[in-house]
Image (spheres, helix red, strand yellow):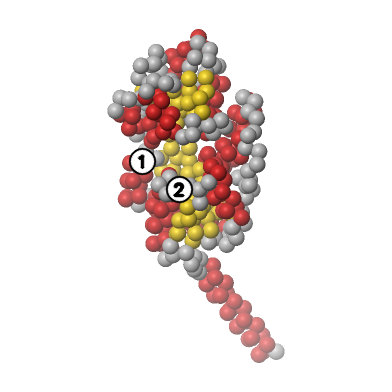
Amino acid sequence: MIRTAISMILLAAAALPASGAFAQAYPAKPIRVIVPATPGDSCDVLSRLIGQKVGERLGQQLAVDNRPGAGGRLGLQLIAQAAPDGYTIGCGQGGNMVIVPIAYKKVPYDSLKDFVPIQIPVTNFLGLVVHPSVPFRNVKDLVAYGRANPGKLVFGSNGEGAFIHFSVELLRTLGKFTYLHVPYNGVAPILTDIISGRIDATITSFISVQPYVNAGRLKLLAIGRATRSPKYPDYPTIAETLPGYENSGWFGFIGPAGMPREQVVLLNKEMNRAVMQPDVRGKLDSYGLEVLTESPEFFADRIRRDMEKWGKVARDIGFKQL
């Protein structure tokens, strides 16, 4: 009996370090980071920049795997279908995780059920820009012009049901004016046509328009933050004229649903540490991005709130899924 008891104690003791070693072994091999976009895209740049720092800390490479296509749907589908073992994660953003499921009927993933949020490193706010010669100096003037000239105010967007389109629609519903919508295949041709005077305005990433604003080729009327930016305190917000308008994009790391909690917490901790490193923080600041160091729960709540917000916009304007 004594020998049996001793054997049981030894077996139990042996099991404890084994389970501890298993938990500490992650990651035991490189982690695949699926980026649903081409090299050079914001998600790609973030994944490489942050992934390098995290890989150095964890002793394993975070290998970026670019999988562009279908507006990000292809890459996100691969993340959703991956084994939830912590060795496949990815980068998503507000457009493909929030707007796409609202705008399209057939989306091969459920943003609220098929992913586990890990970390949201940055957000970027939007800017409302016009050609310098337009007859309005601020948001109040633009709204008044749109009301007095139904259908004459021309906004460009990156497509029907895309993030810019919904951003302009939110502006329209709050301002109670009408406009003419011209869809494009991307942001670059929109800015080209505003600069040339073919169309009047758009709402897009501040990072995209900042060089043109600084050069005097575009006029920034306001930004989409809820409050003024500490970096750019002289820029008014749209909300100062139209209360309730708030619009910002985000990029974040996600894993397939069912990924172990301890792995999520570890990656969140190391990613938050990475974005605060001086060289990383300096680059993110230079891109005009706003750095966050929040929990997975904060990120999950952001996704839910954005789904509710833009879903309401879609319903309010009677948008029919594509």
* Residue 230, position as x, y percentages in the image: 36, 33
Distance between the Cα atoms at labels 1 and 2?
18 Å
Name the residue that disc number 2 marks: 38
Image quadrant where one finds the C terminus: top right
Nearest the eye: 280 or 201? 201
Residue at 43% x, 45% y: name it: 41
* Circle 1 Cα neighbour tier, 10 Å, few/some/many (<14 / 14–19 / ≥20): some
In the picture provided, is 38 more to the left or to the right than 297? left
Tell me the crowding category of disc 2: few under 14, some 14 to 19, or many 20 or more residues within 10 angstroms, Cα based. Answer: some
Question: 205 or 182, which is in the foreground?
Answer: 182
Question: Quick check: 79 above or below 215?
Answer: below
Q: Compared with residue 76, is residue 153 higher up or lower down, i.e. above or below? A: above
Q: Which residue is mark 1?
A: 287
Determine the residue positioned at 44% across, 33% down: 187
Between label 1 and label 2, give the one nearer the viewer. Answer: 2
The percent position of residue 198, horizontal first and vertical second, equals 42, 21
The residue nearer to you, when weighing 64 against 112, is 64
**Element assignment for label 1:** loop
Residue 112 placement: quadrant: top right
